[in-house]
Amino acid sequence: VMTLTTILFLILSIVAIGTAIGTVTAKHPVVSAMNLVLHFFMLAGLYLTLNAQFIAVLQILVYAGAIMVLVVFVILLLNLGKEDQLEEKFSARKGVAMTFGAAFIVQTLILFTSAGKFTHEITANSVTTGYVKNLGYKLFTEYLFPFEFIAILLLVAIVGALLLGKKKLFLERETTQKSLK
């Protein structure tokens, strides 16, 4: 007997897989970004089916909101209008990606064919796992170093993006001034 939670989980996971594929295969970067936004919403729904309410809200606020605004801003800043030059023929990178994709599909098929062998029971403490108090305790005790490392990594990424953006603007100004003279 399939419960409502299981049905929702299956629907959300299928749409999440579809939007992830759409993110990777879209030709236009803005379409890819919109697929990624929808994917983030599907992940938030998956978190809700797993009783992780706080993580679901953070997923929507942080990733679907703030991060995607930055991604779209960077896409517009880079001005990826010449998509013809970005397309490449078959390469070793694509071959490796196809190999990993095939391995992923095989693993997924093995998982679904052996689904009856695993228990799908949720433990008694899984409901309290998603509470803010428990997450905060784990985050600032057990996972403090990775939390701080990610904060520094994001700061470096922002500074790098600003430097790259300013360098491009500086070069454009120089070429404009040279062409005016």
Image (cartoon, grey):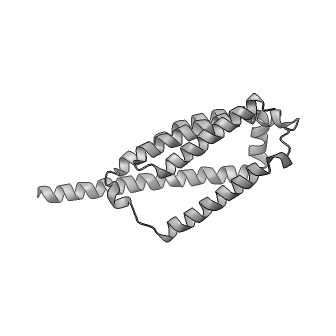
Residue at x-position 46% and y-position 56% = 160
In-front residue for pair 67/17: 17
Query: Based on the displayed image, in which of its 4 quarters is residue 83 positioned?
Result: bottom left
Is residue 69 shown left or right of residue 11?
A: left
Residue 8's x, y, as percent?
69, 32
Q: Residue at horizontal 78%, vertical 40%?
A: 137
> Outermost residue toward the top?
4
Image spot of residue 88 (x, y percent): 40, 64
Left or right of 105: which side holds 95?
left
In the foreground, 145 or 72: 72
Q: Total marks drawn?
A: 0
Residue at 29% over, 56% down: 170
Quarter of the picture holding the C terminus = bottom left
> Residue drawn 37% across and 45% down?
76
Q: Quadrant of residue 126?
A: top right
Q: Looking at this rendering, what residue extends furthest in the bottom direction? A: 92
The relative height of residue 75 versus residue 69 in the rendered view (above or below) is below
Residue 52 visible at all: no
Of all residues shown, which one is farthest toward the right? 124
Q: Nearer the viewer, residue 112 or 59?
A: 112
Question: In the rendered image, which quarter contains the N terminus?
Answer: top right
Camera-side residue: 5 or 135?
A: 5
Question: For the view shown, which residue lies furthest in the left direction?
Answer: 181
| Image coords of residue 132 (percent x, y) | 74, 33
Q: Position of residue 2 (x, y in %)?
A: 78, 32
- Can residue 8 be seen from the camera position used here? yes
Residue 173 found in image quarter = bottom left
